[in-house]
Structure formats: structure tokens, C-alpha cells
Image: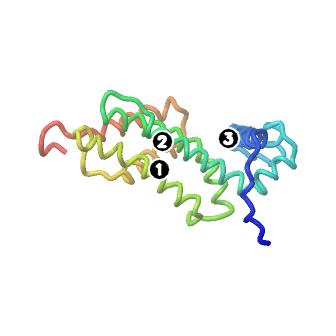
Amino acid sequence: MSRPAPRPPVRRADAERNRDRILAAARTAFAAPDAQVSMAEVARRAGVGMATLYRNFPGRQELLEALYTDEVSAVCDAAGTVGGESPGARLTAWLSEFFAFSTRKRHVAAELLKHSDDSNPVFGDNRARVLAAGRPLLAAAQRDHEVRDDLTLEQVLDLVIAIATIHGDAGYLEPILRAALDGLRAPTSPGTR
């Protein structure tokens, strides 16, 4: 008599809550500019034991990859929920979300790169997800002639990432971001690029 194929494990609700608490604690811990956070510190902040932490994330690399992927998911989800009166306003709102993500993830990405390189699939796969989420916003804004049509989403995101790497607090970076986003506007008359 043949046995049925084993089912993949289903996460219990308390296990899912523990995972979410660990990710929330890690997100806060790694947000500090010079964060040197141990796995024990993440467990302490999450209010879970080390066994629970390692059951969810066998090592630091897995925790950081999950944290990075979780942040990317939030940015991708925001592409479908940002508000604005026009496609250009929705794109700008999403790019502001992407900027916030870029400043938050800087330390997590740097930590991940210590133990791998940028060929790690977590980077490529998540970049593809962000591009897929943002392309419809850029296309709609360009179709309505609100955003210049000579830029790709990759170029726009690289611009935002470059600003996110500048050292300074939000008060310093916000005007730089606004100036860059203003520069995305389509010219008002032909030939004025």
C-alpha cells in the first residue's frame, strides 16, 4: 500500500506571530546607522527564546534575507495602494516609499553583502519584483505626459537610490529628493528638455 505524499508543514498561528515579532524586532534593531546586532539581541527584543529564533531563521544570513524580502514586499504592495490625484502624483508617492525603503535597507543590504555578493538571488529576484511593481506607475505617468518619457524605471530608481546613500538626516535629504522628483516632470513645451 502506497503512502500519500507528505504535506508541507503548515505554520501555526503562534509560529507565524513569533516569526512576525522576530522580523519586527530585527527591522528596528538593524535600523540604527551603526547597528552591530547579535542574534541574541534580536531574540531578546522579540521576546522569544533562541530556539524559537533559530527554528524560524537558522542563521543570521537567513534572517537578513527574510527581513530584506519582507521590506521589498512592503514597497511592492505600496505600488498598488499609493494615492494621488494623477498618475504622476501616484508615481511620486511610490518613489517616496521606495526612498524610505532604500534608506532603511542600506544597513541590512550592507550586512548581507558581507557574507555574499550582489549576485545573491535575493538581490536580483527582489529588484525584479520592485521593477515589476513600479513599471505600471511610470508607464501611466508617461502616457499622461506628466513624467518625461526619456527615462526608464531603472534610471529613476537609481536616482532615488543615489540620494538615499547621501549622509544626512531626513531634513537634509528630503529637499534633495523633492528636487530630483520635480526633475522627472515632462517639459511643458516641445524641445525644452
* Residue topped by disc 2: 98
**Callout 1: SS:** helix
- Residue 55 to residue 75: above or below: below
Q: Are marks 1 and 3 in contact (CB under 8 Å)?
A: no
Q: Earlier in the sequence, mark 1 or mark 3?
A: 3
90 horizontally vs 185: left or right:
right
Residue 33 found in image quarter: top right
The residue drawn where x is 52% and y is 46% is 165
Amino acid found under the numbered disc labelled 2? Phe
Q: Nearer the viewer, mark 2 or mark 1?
A: 1
The percent coordinates of residue 14 (x first, y second) are 78, 39
State how far apart marks 2 and 1 are (Cα): 9 Å
Residue 62 found in image quarter: bottom right
State how far apart marks 1 and 3 are (Cα): 19 Å
**Callout 3: SS:** helix
Q: Residues within 10 Å of mark 3 (few under 14, many from 20)?
A: many
Q: Residues within 10 Å of mark 1 (few under 14, many from 20)?
A: many
The percent coordinates of residue 176 (x first, y second) are 41, 36
Amino acid found under the numbered disc labelled 3? Arg
Determine which of the numbered discs, if any, sits on residue 27 in the image.
Answer: 3
Q: Are marks 2 and 1 in contact (CB under 8 Å)?
A: yes
* Residue topped by disc 1: 130
Amino acid found under the numbered disc labelled 1? Val
Q: Earlier in the sequence, mark 3 or mark 2?
A: 3
Q: Earlier in the sequence, mark 2 or mark 1?
A: 2
